[in-house]
């Protein structure tokens, strides 16, 4: 007579034995506290995804010539006056040079490669139309000479390659 063997029960949990608690890792605490990562940026083993902390998602870079014509024209206008307020031909009410508050969850860098704080100013891409709200297209210019373009009022950014 043959004996039927029962297979061992498989636990339902997928936790790795002795895996560190994510919040016990100082890098994780710092990254979560600064809004650099979310709690989903851990590997399935329960270990911290250190690469996600040390190499946050990159902002795409684009050559000016590949951006829309209105963006190119406005960029060249601001370049012609050294990004010192409005350029010739802009309508009244077009904002140029106001402080951009780089507050989380902004993806713009807070410090340069030397650890210096970066401050930002914002510039409208399109002329203000009297009686209408400003649209969402902006340039954001950093004190480190970086220039970013946003088509959707700071939801996403594209870094513009500059010839300096």
Image (tube, helix red, strand yellow):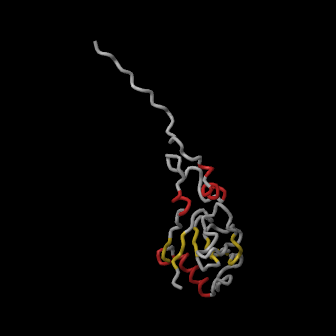
Residue at 65% x, 75% y is 116
Inspect this view and state whether residue 122 appears: no
Quadrant in the picture for residue 95: bottom right
Decide: is 28 above or below 74: above
Residue at 58% x, 77% y is 146
Q: Nearer the viewer, residue 139 or 58?
A: 58
Q: Position of residue 156 (x, y in %)?
A: 57, 64
Q: Quadrant of the N terminus?
A: top left
Residue at 52% x, 54% y is 49
Quadrant in the picture for residue 9: top left
Residue at 42% x, 26% y is 8
Left or right of 35 on screen, residue 10: left
Inspect this view and state whether residue 137 appears: yes
Q: Nearer the viewer, residue 129 or 60?
A: 60
Q: Position of residue 128 (x, y in %)?
A: 67, 73
Q: Position of residue 56 (x, y in %)?
A: 55, 62
Quadrant in the picture for residue 158: bottom right
Decide: is 16 above or below 141: above
């Amino acid at each position: 007579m043959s004996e039927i063997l029962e297979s061992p029960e498989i636990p339902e949990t997928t936790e790795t034995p002795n895996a560190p608690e994510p919040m016990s890792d100082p890098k994780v605490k710092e990254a979560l506290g600064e809004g650099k990562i979310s709690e989903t940026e851990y590997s399935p083993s329960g270990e911290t995804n250190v690469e996600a902390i040390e190499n946050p998602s990159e902002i795409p870079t684009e050559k000016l010539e590949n951006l829309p014509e209105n963006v190119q024209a406005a960029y060249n206008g601001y370049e012609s006056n050294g990004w010192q307020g409005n350029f010739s031909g802009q309508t009244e009410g077009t904002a140029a040079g106001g402080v951009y508050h780089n507050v989380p969850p902004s993806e713009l860098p807070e410090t340069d490669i030397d650890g210096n704080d970066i401050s930002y100013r914002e510039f409208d891409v399109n002329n203000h139309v009297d009686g209408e709200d400003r649209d969402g297209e902006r340039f954001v210019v950093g004190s480190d000479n970086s220039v970013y373009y946003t088509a959707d009022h700071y939801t996403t950014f594209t870094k513009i390659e500059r010839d300096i």
